[in-house]
Amino acid sequence: MSPIRQPARGSRRLATAGVAVTTATLLAVTLSPAAHAATGPTRATAIEHAASALLSHAASLGLTSAQGTSVRDVIVDRNGTQHVRYDRTYHNLPVLGGDFVVHLAPNGGYRGADRATRSAISLPSTTPEISAPKAADLAVNALRAANLGERLQQVKAKPQLVIDALHGAPRLAWRTNAVGLDSLGNPVARTVITDARTGTRIDAWDAIETAAGDGQSLYSGTVALQTTQSGSSYQLKDPTRGNTYTGDAANKTDLCFLGICFSRAPATLFTDADNHWGTGSGADRSTAAVDAQYGTDETWDYYKNVHGRNGIGGDGKGSFNRVHYGNSYNNAFWDDSCFCMTYGDGDGTTFGPLVALDVAGHEMTHGVTSKTAALTYSGESGGLNEATSDILGTMVEWYADNPSDPGDYLIGEKIVRPGFGKSALRYMDRPSKDGSSADYWSSSVGNLDVHYSSGVANHFAYLLAEGSGPKTINGVAYNSPTYNGSTITGIGRDKVGRIWYRALTVYMTSSTNYAGARAATLNAAKDLYGAGSTEYNTVAAAWSAVNVN
């Protein structure tokens, strides 16, 4: 979120028919799908069915003997339909844009697949002509150029050789994460994709995606908290939600989120003597921790109770939070490398502590995206990555139904201060109100910063939920226009959340653009409500209303 931004599996191989199939759990392929009919397919049987489909449909999936696959995510619908998402390697090198989703009938029969790229992945050589140190130097220069005017400290870079299939014909490339500290000691980071043959920069993007006791919070009033008793005191750790917990970063900084580590900032677990946390004032360090833990709880509950997802990774594992990170740090971010949320205190002029509920929902949704579609954080897919966090983070806020922070279509409205000059970071009903975001799609929208190209999808989601024209909701006035002058009648926010989540987890891939998002959400609406339903037709109309046809 602007200015909040975010960064960039053991397996076993079965070689059959010249294709290397890799799964986290590959069961005997001779086991009949009918054997599971009584109870319905499980994650394990879905992986088994998909492994068989990979062997039978290798050619249509672009798989060759030089490639390997690994399971990233599995969705099993209530009717038994299965969707297994794969990452791909070529001669053991990760393939950017090589991901695909296999769709299977309830009996395990192959129904088709969605692929991030349809290009044949075949290279004459995987030996780079540009060395790793050279790629690192180029990325460091890109980081310094992107932070012009800052005197960066302790800059480091870590190149990884990959196959780039996201930007045209597949080619050998270096994906380099460059990190450093700004003049306040806070982290800056950039991911740079470099042609490993010529040294030409292919792409680059910011790599920080930005962001029963009770507690008195800063933004959400007094909230209930599940905690853990330890002796005579209590820990801010929730055993009912995968042991999610919140710790104090002691205003320290780390850069371990990109695989490059100077030092890891602490996450000293908050404890309390009476299980009544915080005072509602920022002067008490545990108050921000209350907000962070509450945000984690509500996000967990939203994904589990609405979408059936058990935690950010879908595996029941709890994440953790670090509050009071950095020095007046105007940011919050999700980091896959620690599976954690990190919150700055803000500078007090532009932002207050960045622990608001929709910020938490936004940032942790980056974690869900990384475990599912893994939308590349650049171009139109980057805008969709940010919009996914805005849309589903907003749904978390509506789900929580907290009278101190009622649901709205404003992003980050609680954290902004008068010095920011606006009432929110972003506005979903008319994104251009922030001065930079796009209301409608155009051929140049992918050239915008991802926090501004996200406006097209945010506008679509608002129109789909609430419709066009002026209205007041929960005391907030909205007035949403349409590109084509059409009138849209909304289908309600709950249906929007379900459609977007299914599109993300079942149909989108790392390279999905706005045209692909239209197709993915239409497929999702068809699955949920039927082809030709009011919901399906309104999805189509809302995309046309933002000029995605």
Image (cartoon, rainbow, N blue to C red):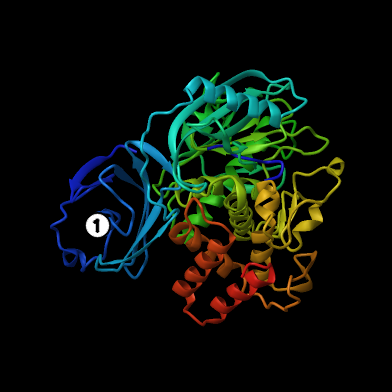
Q: Residue 402 location, x and y as percent?
A: 66, 56
Q: Residue 457 location, x and y as percent?
A: 64, 60
Q: Residue 235 location, x and y as percent?
A: 52, 33
Neighbour tally class for label 1: few under 14, some 14-19, many 20 plus, Cα within 10 Å? many
- Name the secondary structure under disc 1: helix
Which quarter of the figure has residue 356? top right
Q: With respect to residue 107, does 3 lie above or below? A: above
Q: With respect to residue 248, does 391 lie above or below? A: below
Which quarter of the figure has residue 517? bottom right
Q: Which residue is outermost to the top?
A: 154
Q: Residue at x 59, y 36 (%)?
A: 207
Of residues 369 and 232, the one drawn nearer to the viewer in this rendering: 369
Q: Residue at x 75, y 50 (%)?
A: 413
Of residues 341 and 237, the one drawn nearer to the viewer in this rendering: 341
- Name the kind of residue labelled 1 in the image: Thr
Q: Residue at x 73, y 78 (%)?
A: 486
Tell me the quadrant of the picture where the C terminus can be found.
Answer: bottom right
Q: How many marks?
A: 1
Looking at the image, can residue 120 be seen? yes
Asked whether, in this view, residue 523 is left or right of residue 479, the answer is left
Q: With respect to residue 194, does 541 lie above or below? A: below
Asked whether, in this view, residue 284 is left or right of residue 522, the answer is right
Q: Residue 324 location, x and y as percent?
A: 66, 30
Asked whether, in this view, residue 208 is left or right of residue 151, the answer is left
Which quarter of the figure has residue 156? top right
Of residues 319 and 522, the one drawn nearer to the viewer in this rendering: 522
Read off the residue under disc 1: 45
Looking at the image, can residue 306 be seen? no
